[in-house]
Image: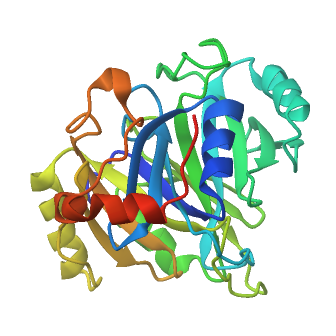
Amino acid sequence: MLTQIKGLHHVTSMAANAQQNSDFFTKKLGLRRVKKTVNFDSPDVYHLYYGDEVGTPGSVMTYFPFPHIAPNHPGAGEVGETYFAVPKGSLGYWKGRLEGLDVTGLSETEVFGEKRLRFNGPDRDAFSLIETDDARIGWNHSEVDAAEAIKGFHGASLRLKDAGATKELLGFMGYQQVDSKDAWTRFAIEGGNGADVIDIETLPQANNARQGAGSVHHIAFAVENRAAQLEVRKALMDTGHQVTPVIDRDYFWAIYFRTPGGVLFEIATNEPGFDRDEDTAHLGEALKLPSRYEAHRTQIEDMLEPITD
């Protein structure tokens, strides 16, 4: 069993409109935009990152806004719902706030003993706010006060037709099964980074998901550094997984592999962080480009729809 993985690093999804996406996460959810860059494989598309003050691993929701992308078709073989952690006693505040901002899909429920408030993102992305008592501190320089601010992720759910092989994989990655009820099974990492819960919903009759706006593209798990990442990569390959080489994403190093259930997993390093090319006070303000694209900055900026803060 691996011990290097400490929980989630980030979750990356797809959107249809960059401005709408930025407004939703910064103005409605009160997160900080910690990086405005481009899709490293398609520089005519933004890559936007939202999180706490510095983009601490385990707090960062990221998006590729593709201007003409079709809506998603939910189903099996994907991340079903992303969970954000909020302070104890804050769900009433959040319900009133999101209702007042015309956020759709609001519903209150309880899963595995946790009260949660479900809601949709602008592309019908599926989210929940879950009260936790962990010590993380959210971004508190928005309309949302520190007493209610989102701390980061609590975890995520996976929708799968057959969960057996993915359960074994999570166990190998250091997750332990801690609960189950009906079609749901919960896994968690003891002593993780707070973003350390994964639920599996088993749906044997479901159609396969079709990705589009509102879909999670991949889910990333955190390791401390490159040495730990290489250990994880070797262990995964030794057990038969097809893992990419290490890829430099400027703010972390990444490896990727497709899980038995069809979900794309990433293992990302906590280093070097989002302040490697911007002062912490000004994170997410300027368009930052990978060095290989800097010579083409003018053309890239002309292709991207401006985002007003």
User: Of all residues shown, which one is farthest toward the left?
Assistant: 227
Residue 13, x across and y down, in percent: 55, 62
Answer above or below: position of 293 versus 98. Answer: below
Answer above or below: position of 287 versus 217. Answer: above
Residue 300: image quadrant is bottom left
302 vs 158, left or right, is left
**Foreground of the two, 88 or 137:** 137
Q: Is residue 39 visible?
A: no
291 vs 204, left or right, is left
Residue 144, x across and y down, in percent: 67, 19
Residue at horizontal 68%, vertical 81%? 209
Residue at horizontal 74%, vertical 20%? 90
**Foreground of the two, 176 or 91:** 91
Answer above or below: position of 186 versus 195. Answer: below
Q: Is residue 139 visible?
A: yes
Residue 171, x across and y down, in percent: 40, 63
Residue 62, x across and y down, in percent: 49, 52
Residue at horizontal 63%, vertical 49%? 19
Query: Quadrant location of the N terminus?
Result: bottom left
